[in-house]
Amino acid sequence: MSKQGEQMRSNVLRVLRQRDAPMSAYDLLRELQSDAPRLAPTTIYRALEKLVERGSVHRLESLNAFMACRCEGPVDMSVLAICDDCGAVEENLATSVHEQLSNIASQSGFEPGRRVVEIHGRCASCTVDEVHS
């Protein structure tokens, strides 16, 4: 593991933790290029790949974006509730869902890799805002 690669992963994770909203790889690139103008997209993607493997970052497939994991300690499975109105993302642990999906997968001999469930809808704030409008 290179010192440069570890520093890049640390920088990417720092930026993601400072944001409340998910970021694309290119958003991260623009953010980090102020300190490293020659930074390439492949470097960001490599850093993100390692951070996802470690469980420090979630890839939101439906948004093609990334966010820092907000849970403390190792997580078997997260359910990410994504508001289609304001873009807020709430992370929840889902132990029983993880067990159920693992059982379903094992019945067919399937070995899951990443375990992230995304649910789209409207957050409580957006729902309340509409009611009061």
Image (spheres, grey):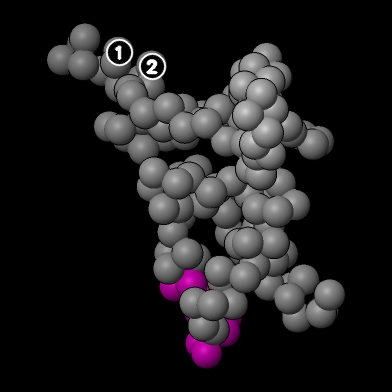
**Eyeballing the image, is 30 above or below 106?**
below
Query: As rendered, which of 122 and 61 lies closer to the eye?
Result: 61
Q: Residue furthest top?
A: 131
Residue 73 shown left or right of residue 38 in the figure: right
Which numbered disc covers residue 108?
none
**Eyeballing the image, is 55 above or below 130?**
below
Mark 1 residue crowding within 10 angstroms, few (<14) / some (14–19) / many (20+):
few
Q: In percent of the image, x 44 and y 72: which residue is there? A: 30
Disc 2 element: helix
Total residue callouts: 2
Residue under pointer 1: 128
* Distance from the alpha carbon under mark 2 to that under mark 1: 6 Å
- Is residue 24 in sight in this rendering? yes
> Looking at the magenta stretch, what is its main secondary structure?
loop
Residue under pointer 2: 124
Q: In percent of the image, x 68 and y 72: which residue is there? A: 8
Magenta part of the chain: 29-38
Q: Residue furthest front?
A: 108
**Eyeballing the image, is 101 above or below 43?**
above
Residue 89 shown left or right of residue 109 in the figure: left
Mark 2 residue crowding within 10 angstroms, few (<14) / some (14–19) / many (20+):
few
Residue contact at pointers 2 and 1, CB within 8 angstroms: yes
